[in-house]
Image: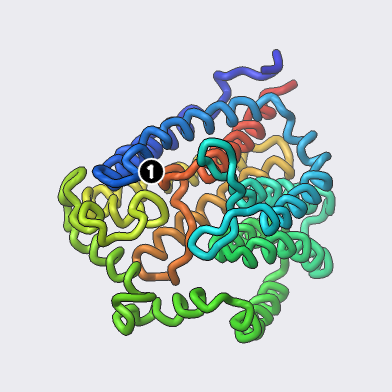
């Protein structure tokens, strides 16, 4: 690390909170996969977390201003990589999102594109040098973000595409987009919804229809949601205890160590455990926002708030999905769900936040 930077200036409380969430995630993965073919997922998750910490450390010496300078090339490379997923990607559960690697590992390009979107929005809005975002500039930026979002939606991966848009919306709000433009864009979005319906896959349409009334197809499209809500409700106040959740242990709950890990956690730790976990996530987001407030300039502020928007979108969509407040869409819970690409992207995002933080102390 540069002689101008010191490890003492890293946001250690933020990192401690994240590692605590990761530890809970590893424990929950162990509980959810005990006695199954995926019983070794918990120690793989430990390796993923260790790799994420290494990636976070490696990104710290790289000045984020230099990253912003190279964002055009990174953006084009991201588009090429997303297109490449259609050529060499492996189809899993009807989605072509992963590129197979050696040893059974898979690389999800769309996860790492999230970081490019954060940097893209930060550079674009910083270069405008204005206190109020013009509607024409907003539409240009929206086009840049919606292009990769459209490619991801085509995989199909609605959840990840929504996180790209969340970064765009928060950036536009901070850049001073006038409320009347917000109203026009919102109205346009509502009018476009019927058109967008025709671009959804059949199973996505079924999920949207059944999320309001999952009981109409309890053994089909409504199964995941019903089992998830049953798991959450059966946890009670204090939960059933680690490895004692019936929905996960008896394999009623689908993928309880990935997208539905929060349901399995709620069943085993109850309302009290859920409250504590949500408190940890809240403090995590607030620490990132605090780093945005103390950023040395606007680009750093946009980066930190982009990370906050990304992680918050993940949390709200995932928990809303498993609780039946949103349609089911495949999106991991940050730092808890099993999976290397998600963990590494989240730690790299933390690296960006600390990268901005460290530059406050550079003379």
Q: Is residue 75 visible?
A: yes
Q: Which structural element holds mark 1?
A: helix
Which residue is denoted by mark 1 in the rendering? 280
Q: Which residue is at the front of the view, 243 or 324?
A: 243
Q: Is residue 238 visible?
A: no
Q: Which residue is at the front of the view, 39 or 281?
A: 39
Name the image quarter holding residue 8.
top right
In this figure, which colouring scheme has been used for the structure?
rainbow
259 displayed left or right of 132: left
Write the residue at 59% across / 65% down. 156
Write the residue at 26% across / 48% down. 273
Q: State whether residue 247 is above or below residue 339.
A: below
Location of residue 40 in the rendering, given as x and y in whole percent from the top left corner: 35, 37
310 displayed left or right of 24: right
Write the residue at 72% across / 28% down. 62
Q: Neighbour class for label 1 at 10 Å: few (<14), some, many (≥20)?
A: some
Location of residue 277 in the rendering, given as x and y in whole percent from the top left corner: 34, 46
């Amino acid at each position: 690390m540069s002689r101008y930077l010191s490890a003492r200036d890293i946001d250690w409380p933020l990192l401690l909170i994240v590692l605590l969430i990761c530890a809970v995630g590893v424990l929950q993965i162990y509980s959810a996969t005990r006695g199954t073919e995926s019983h070794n997922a918990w120690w793989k998750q430990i390796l993923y977390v260790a790799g994420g910490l290494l990636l976070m450390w490696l990104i710290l010496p790289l000045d984020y201003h230099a990253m912003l300078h190279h964002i055009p090339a990174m953006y084009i490379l991201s588009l090429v990589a997303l297109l490449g997923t259609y050529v060499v990607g492996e189809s899993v559960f009807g989605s072509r999102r992963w590129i197979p690697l050696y040893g059974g590992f898979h690389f999800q390009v769309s996860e790492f594109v999230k970081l490019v979107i954060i940097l893209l929005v930060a550079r674009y809005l910083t270069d405008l040098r204005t206190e109020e975002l013009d509607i024409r500039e907003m539409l240009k930026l929206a086009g840049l973000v919606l292009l990769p979002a459209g490619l991801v939606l085509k995989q199909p991966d609605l959840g990840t595409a929504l996180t790209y848009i969340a970064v765009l919306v928060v950036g536009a709000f901070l850049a001073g987009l006038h409320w009347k433009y917000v109203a026009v864009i919102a109205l346009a979005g509502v009018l476009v919804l019927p058109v967008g319906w025709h671009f959804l896959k059949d199973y996505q349409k079924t999920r949207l229809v059944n999320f309001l009334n999952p009981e109409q197809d309890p053994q089909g499209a409504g199964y995941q949601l019903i089992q998830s809500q049953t798991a959450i409700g059966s946890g009670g106040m204090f939960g059933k205890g680690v490895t004692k959740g019936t929905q996960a242990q008896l394999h009623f709950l689908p993928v309880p160590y990935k997208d539905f890990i929060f349901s399995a956690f709620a069943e085993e730790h109850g309302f009290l455990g859920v409250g504590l976990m949500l408190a940890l996530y809240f403090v995590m987001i607030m620490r990132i926002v605090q780093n945005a407030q103390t950023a040395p300039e606007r680009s750093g502020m946009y980066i930190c708030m982009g990370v906050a928007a990304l992680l918050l979108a993940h949390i709200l969509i995932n928990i809303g999905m498993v609780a039946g407040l949103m349609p089911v869409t495949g999106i991991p819970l940050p730092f808890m769900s099993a999976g290397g690409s998600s963990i590494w992207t989240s730690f790299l995002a933390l690296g960006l936040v600390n990268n901005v933080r460290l530059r406050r102390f550079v003379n």
